[in-house]
Image (spheres, rainbow, N blue to C red):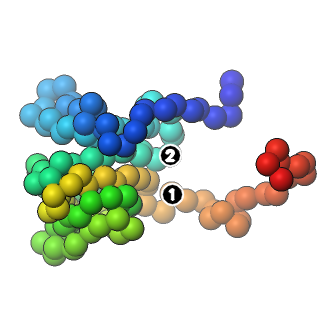
Amino acid sequence: MKNFQSRNFGALRDLNQYVFAPEGTPINVEGKLFLGKELGLSSMEVSLNKDAAGNGMPFYHRHHNNEELYIFISGHGEMSIDDEIIPVQEGSVVSVQPDARRAWWNTGDSELTYIVIQAPVAGLKAATLEDGEILEGAVPWS
């Protein structure tokens, strides 16, 4: 078995080809692609997302165990977190704890593109410096 998985899902501008529509629910969100199952992730979920101008998450939600990190890549929008409105744009990074009530929408005239990472609260055993190890050998590009 390989120590990695690699896939190319295409350009972020083409995310609208993916639709999150769980069977048995009224949810139908265009431009949302979950990567966990696709890449065999076991300690986090990651989604690639794109909302057209004027669109957004059509419902409020919260989580039981997972904190979320939203990384905004392009566009302009707003997040509603526990009834506080936070403006977001390219370069905005927002951490949201599980109990927070959240939704977001695109307030701009172009696409709002972002990545969401979910992971269990307090699940990180060690950060990069404590967990990493430098190995011997020259990398091909040096």
Say if mark 1 contacts mark 2, CB within 8 Å.
yes
The answer to whether 105 appears left or right of 98 in the picture is: left
Instruction: State the residue at coordinates (32%, 42%).
Output: 13
| Residue 65: x %, y % from top left | 35, 54
Locate the N terminus by quadrant. top right
* Residue 11 x, y percent position in the rendering: 40, 39
Left or right relative to 94: residue 134:
right
> Considering the numbered disc 2 on the image, is that residue within a helix, a strand or a loop?
loop
Q: Residues within 10 Å of mark 2 (few under 14, many from 20)?
A: few
Q: Is 42 on the left or on the right of 61, as rendered?
A: right
Q: Amino acid at mark 2?
A: Ser
User: Which residue sits at x=19%, y=25%?
Assistant: 23
| Dot 1 amino acid type | Gly
Quick one: which residue is furthest to the front in this view?
109
What residue is shown with label 2? 43
Q: Position of residue 36 (x, y in %)?
A: 44, 37
Q: Residues within 10 Å of mark 1 (few under 14, many from 20)?
A: few
- Viewer can see residue 101: no
Q: Residue at x 18, y 48 (%)?
A: 52
Q: Which mark is residue 4?
A: none
- At horizontal 68% and vertical 34% (from top left) the residue drawn is 3
Find residue 123 and name its label.
1
Q: Earlier in the sequence, mark 1 or mark 2?
A: 2
Residue 136 shows in this picture: yes
Closer to the camera in the image, 2 or 130: 2
Residue 42 image position (x, y, % from top left): 51, 40
107 and 79: which one is in front?
A: 107
From the viewer's perspective, is residue 55 above or below residue 25? below
Dot 1: what SS?
A: loop
Picture layout, residue 92 above or below residue 74:
below
Q: How many labels, in total?
A: 2
